[in-house]
Amino acid sequence: MSKDLTEIVRLINLYIDGAGKGDAKKLDEAFHSSAHWFGTVHGVDYALDKESFIGLMVETPGDTGVMQCKITDIQIDGSAATATLREVGFWGTLAFTDYFSLALLDGRWQITCKTFANTGETA
């Protein structure tokens, strides 16, 4: 596995652990300071900055004991990359496909954006 791929997998796992357990430190490490999150859940649109997203995850962690995640794709092109993650059991019953944009900035990979699709209920 290349150094870049290893680092991107590490960052996505920081997201999984951070969002799942409400760990602000892990989320802060994974995401660029100007990162944003976009998506819709049950007709509610979300457009969150980093501080708002981390606050939401700390207040309501995603893993209630049933969350399962799988990285399904990573594409790297020089200093830009994308990663796709499937989440099942987020907040107990939701399923998502997450699309992450990453950039090599200041000498390190950082997640710059997460766009998600609520793909259904799991229970």
Image (spheres, rainbow, N blue to C red):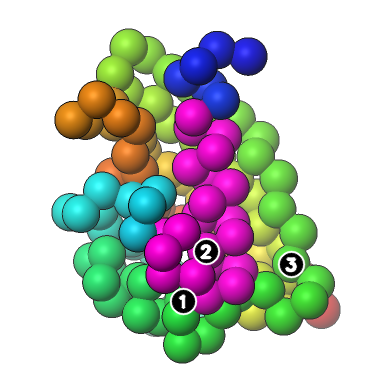
Q: How far apart, in angstroms, are the residues tagged by discs 2 and 3?
A: 13 Å
The reply to whether residue 58 is visible in this rendering is yes
Q: Residues within 10 Å of mark 2 (few under 14, many from 20)?
A: many
Q: Which residue is mark 2?
A: 18
Q: Is residue 16 magenta?
A: yes
Up/down of 99 relative to 34, above or below: above
**Residue shown at 41%/70% (left/top)?**
24
The reply to whether residue 121 is visible in this rendering is no
**Residue shown at 74%/67% (left/top)?**
67
Q: Main secondary structure of the magenta part?
A: helix
Q: Residue 14: percent from the left, percent from the top?
A: 52, 51
Comparing marks 2 and 3, which lies closer to the viewer?
2
Up/down of 98 relative to 92, above or below: above
Total count of labels:
3
Q: Secondary structure at mark 2?
A: helix
Q: Which residue is mark 3?
A: 67
Q: Which residue is mark 1?
A: 57
| Span colored in magenta | 7-27
- First along the sequence among labels 1 and 3: 1
